[in-house]
Image (cartoon, helix red, strand yellow):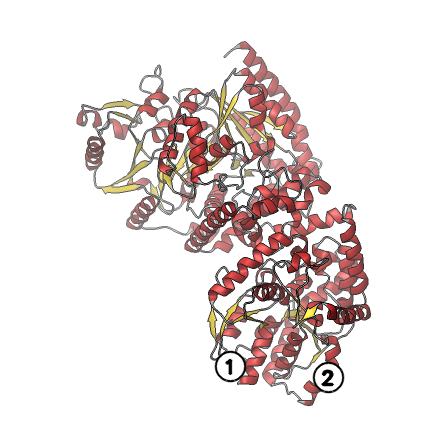
Amino acid sequence: MADQELTLLEQLEKESRAKQAKFIGGIAEKLGRKDIAQKPQHPFRGAPDFWNQLNWTQEEKIERFMDNWQSVGGHAARFQTMEEAKQFIVDRANEFGARHMIRQNQPELNELGLEEALPETDIRVWNSDPEEYWKAHAAGADIGVAVVDHAIAYTGTITVLSSPDKGRSVTLLPTVMMAIIPVERLKTRMGEVMEKIDGMRREDLPAGIHFITGPSRSSDIENDLTIGVHGPGIVYALIVG
Amino acid sequence: MSHGQQASTVKERSHIALNNEFLRKAVKFTTERLRNGKKKATEEHGNWEEWRERGRQIRLHTIAHLDYYLNQFVENARANGVHVHFAADGKEAVELSMKIAASKQTRSVVKSKSMVSEELHINAALEKMGIEAVETDLGEYIIQLAGETPSHIIIPAIHKNRYQIAELLSKEAGETLPADTSILAGFVRRKLREKFLDAEIGMTGCNFAIAETGSMVLFENEGNARMVSTVPKTQITLMGMERIIPTFADLEVMATLLPRSATGQKLTVYMSAISGPKRDADADGPEEMHIIIVDNGRSLQLGDPEFQELLNCIRCGACLNACPVYRHIGGHAYGGTYSGPIGAVLTPALQSNVAEWDDIANASSLCGACYEACPVKIPLHDMLVYLRNRKVEKGYGQTAEKIGMKGFAAIMSNSKRMRSVIKMGQIGQKLVARQGMIKTKIGPLKGWNSVRYLPSLPNQSFRERWGTLEQEVQASNPKMSDEVRQRMEQALEQRKNGGRHHG
Amino acid sequence: MKVSLFITCLSDAIYPRVGEAMVRLLARYGVQVEFPKTQTCCGQPAFNSGYWEEARESARTLLAAFEDSDFVISPSGSCTGMIQHYYPKLFEKDPIMIEKAMQLQEKTYEFTQFLVQVLGVKDVGAVFPHKVTYHPSCHGSRLLGIKEEPLTLMENVKGMELIPLPFAEDCCGFGGTFAVKMSEISAAMVSEKAQHVLESEAEVLVGLDMGCMMNISGNLMYQGKPIRVMHLAELLYEGVKQA
């Protein structure tokens, strides 16, 4: 970082702190208070109570998730074992003639052995060498593979959290996204995922939490649905277990 | 400013829009599609009124304690490593953005859709500095190439057809592109990929900001907002100061209301919660992140009992899709950044300039469809009346209307005068009434009678007829059954014990 | 029990037949309506345009005229809505008048509300062998929540075919002074509404607000389309006479 930038940031930081009292104090004043309010009672937190009772059986969750994911144009499949899921990924990669793939650096994927099964394909492991430009690798990949952190049956949504081993780009930049969902991570409602996030300490939060519900889409040209505008246009949800 | 805004009044601008056949068809088609999508999605989800009420309560609560929650957000965002800035108005927000941009010596900025940035006209400021500002949402990109402004919150290029779009994109491509959606979108994908990789700075808006964690949340379908907040080294987020909600649990409610109300989706394809710049060991995400918290007229609504609820708005566009006026005139006729019913109230409210801006408050029949559609139950139809009232109380009423209303009060404050006026009408109309109709287009009847006929007044008004009618009815000697009597007495009783519930 | 008719200025001057139908229909249930002649207008034209002082002058005539009434019944969802929804606001700074405004708010009913909710009438025993379509006026249906009452009454009319109106809930473009001030937008709206009425192929258009009915029928007449436009009270009373 250049010196000049540092000075600017420091200067802006100083200005910000000086302005904060006036800005937020002004809000308090408009709301009829002399000082900033104390932590208020929060009586209507989150979804209505009746909603929080909703809990589907595992079979129901799987069925609803797959229906929802497919209804927005995603592909979904269910497997008993990771080995079956791997075979599916390998078959698709061969079918597409994938030359470049990228995958998260997750234990489940490290054990999968995709590299051995696809010797012709260049498979990169996210951030396995901090010196490389990983965003470019992801942008150049035909397929990105990730194991999701959570999935939500009610909306057909997967949730992925970023970390040094889990790039945000892996689920965003490749043409095809393959998301593996260990069945025990599949929840009924979004609220169940939110509860987990609310339960984390702020300092433990990842920089990026992404909820993904199908392929990238747009209807901006004459209401005509277009798939794959910026994000992946072909997305697979592979439920395992 | 641009297209459709040369005309100075909403009347003139709507005249232009009403004569644009393509525009009217396109707007009708799109709003119907979105409105039907919403209807289907809310019915399928069920208990919609409970969800609306919950959404409203969360927004009311947050805004009522905005000082606390905004402060909490700022502290947490800073702890996440975000540089937080405050901008009292659009000028300050632009200056802050420019300072950051200048320090990066960048040639281009990639932007994802943000209504706040439209409010600030930040693209023009960047261009002035020689920095290319690239809108990356497909619709926004199209209207940027056309040099126009969005005409719908959700579908910005609602007013363009595929041939116009093909022409715009062909110019950019340097070759003739066919008017085929997937080819056009494919071109934009490739073109913008280059821009993403080139840009030093990504600029986003902010749908929600979570106080407890200092996170900012983006809803989108294309993935461009994720690109903007993942690829460039620096992220600048422009955030309206009222975007706050307390927790992620509350985000579930907003995520239930917003996509369903906007497009009828269960959830947008991407919902991203970003909590600061990339962590040290992460290999993507911005290295530096700024959030500029913008007031720009918002605080004028705080503490104003008639307008504070405006800050509850979650920018879903459902009121546009429900509005019969928007349906016919489209977004540009409103003349401001925000269009439709929310724009008719928000634009003057943010400007605090009653005289100049309230003219769009007249572009409503007060039918209340906006209120019914609103996922957080903002009474926009009431606010429109309040705005009109403020204009009059501040003495900005039009002279002719003032005289008319004085006349109205003089007649209607006294039933005898009202009766004589009706009498005069009955006699006076003889010159123009034929077969129970008045067809003339002179004077005040011009607007009405250009597409309608006015019924003429019957020979006797009701009050003239009453004497005979009353006698006739009494002569028939009506008898009340016990059941009817009991029901009426019951209604009176109920009223005494805490009143009846009105619709 | 004193049941008073709030005729509304529009029905008083232009559609006295609506008031007459209401009075005669209610008489069949032994409800003798009285008509305080000092009433004028609810004040909505002035109120909606922002002229609240002028609206108050008009509104005061209603507060006085109906002071002793137990029930006030009106053939307009819009004018009833004005009393229900906005009178307390209009008089919020006047401690004496607000009391009266809230009393009037309590006892005012739109015609079908009174018939169905208070009297418990669901079937007036009418026969009306025609194809009919119904426009639910915005203020009645949205502000007052009158949705079921007219449908219940219409479903029980014998021989009548009730045809759904496409985009029924869309505003007809009347909006009081809106139709004059923003005449071009209003014209586009009413033309579309009339088009939907024609598409329904109904012989009769029925509603609960003569402002909207005057607007739509004005356009239908202008187009030379012979569709009969009536208030539901008229239809029910005519049907009762025929039965």
Disc 1 target residue: C127
| Residue at figure coordinates x 47%, y 56% from the top left | B47
Mark 2 packing: few (<14 Cα in 10 Å), some, or many (20+)?
Answer: few
Image mark 1: chain = C
Tag of residue B468: 2
Up/down of B334 relative to B135, above or below: below
Q: Is residue B180 left or right of residue C176?
A: left
Q: Which residue is more in the foreground, B207 or A80?
A: B207
Kindly state the secondary structure of the residue where label 1 is placed: loop
Is residue A62 in view from this perspective?
Answer: yes
Q: Which kind of residue does numbered mark 1 sit on?
A: Val
Is residue C7 in view from this perspective?
Answer: no
| Residue at figure coordinates x 58%, y 13% from the top left | A7
Tag of residue A97: none
Asked if disc 1 and disc 2 are in contact, CB closer than 8 Å, the reply is no
Residues tagged by mark 1 and mark 2 found on one chain of the structure: no
Q: Is residue B478 left or right of residue C239?
A: right
Residue A53 % position (x, y): 41, 52
Kindly state the secondary structure of the residue where label 2 is placed: helix
Q: In this view, does C99 lie to the left or right of B226?
A: right
Residue A60 % position (x, y): 30, 50
Q: Tell me where residue C228 sits by quadrant.
A: bottom right
In which quadrant of the rendered image does the C terminus of chain A lie? Answer: top left
Q: Which kind of residue does numbered mark 2 sit on?
A: Thr
Q: Which residue is more in the foreground, B409 or A14?
A: B409
Image mark 2: chain = B
Q: Which residue is more in the foreground, A170 or B66?
A: A170
Q: Is residue B89 left or right of residue A137?
A: right
Q: Measure the C-alpha gap from mark 1 to mark 2.
A: 27 Å
Up/down of B383 relative to B75, above or below: below
Q: Tell me where residue A158 sits by quadrant.
A: top left
Mark 1 packing: few (<14 Cα in 10 Å), some, or many (20+)?
Answer: many
